[in-house]
Amino acid sequence: MPEIDLEALGAAAGPMQVWVLPALLGLGLASATGLRTFLPLLMLALAARFELFGVQLIDQMDWLAGWPAIAALAVATAAEFLGDKIPAVDHALNAVGYVTRPAAGAIAAGSVFWAVDPAMAAVAGLIVGAPAALAFNAAQTGVRVGSTTTTGGLGNPLVSLIEDVLAFLTVIVAFLAPIIVPLVLLVLAVVVFRLARRIRDRRETRPA
């Protein structure tokens, strides 16, 4: 297979396709990994496998679209989905997420910088992906702690289900319209903040 000249490819594509759209797509994917470690990676792998939404991966990440990786991600996604519905287990997953989710965010974001050098793609993934994933994982922590304190953990499965939906929709928006990802993330941040504040207010107004 002939070697691809990434510099020539980047020059032909232009900065919008080379940097801006991958950065926005990566930002959306990484933010979703802050809520769910494996679901965004699974959706990215499936999109690349079936050539959906124009998703392209860097050559070094082609393995992600292979069936073994997809199968492993599917199992991990299902395990995370079920585990996060169990009080106490959900907190453990969230704590581990402070390590795994920034890593997943960096991988997801770096994978879509398809027209640049692999080293630059990795750096871009770290810059775009890790902080976004960490921020949303931290926000999730606040919501989950508040829910546990207020409901004794009984409300956590509902909160978890809401997070599942938000993570899924964030990835879909990133695929379909990456240009509006910053606006969507702003709205998502407001929703999470208000949810956390409502839970906190309920906790403070409970009778002693």
Image (tube, rainbow, N blue to C red):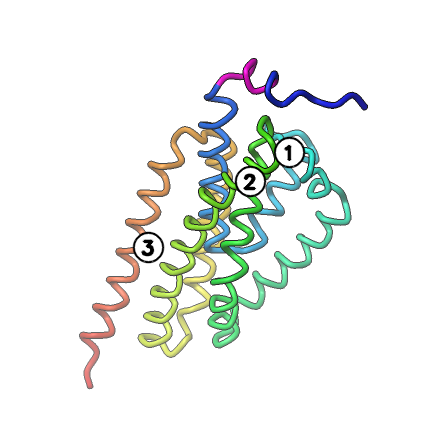
Q: Position of residue 44 (x, y in %)?
A: 60, 41
Q: Amino acid at mark 1?
A: Ile
Comparing marks 1 and 3, which lies closer to the viewer?
1
Residue under label 2, please give it: 110
What SS does tag 1 mark? loop
Asked if the residues shown at circle 1 and circle 3 are in contact, with their CB atoms under 8 angstroms apart, the answer is no
Q: Amino acid at mark 3?
A: Val
Q: Residues within 10 Å of mark 1 (few under 14, many from 20)?
A: some
Q: In the shown orientation, is residue 38 left or right of residue 187?
A: right
Asked if the residues shown at circle 2 and circle 1 are in contact, with their CB atoms under 8 angstroms apart, the answer is yes
Q: Which residues are magenta?
A: 9-14
Residue under label 3, please give it: 192
Please say whether residue 63 is one of the residues in the magenta stretch: no
What SS does tag 2 mark? helix
Q: Is residue 153 above or below residue 109?
A: below
Q: Residues within 10 Å of mark 3 (few under 14, many from 20)?
A: some
Distance from Cα at disc 1 to Cα at disc 3: 33 Å
Distance from Cα at disc 2 to Cα at disc 1: 8 Å
Residue displayed at 63% across by 59% down: 78
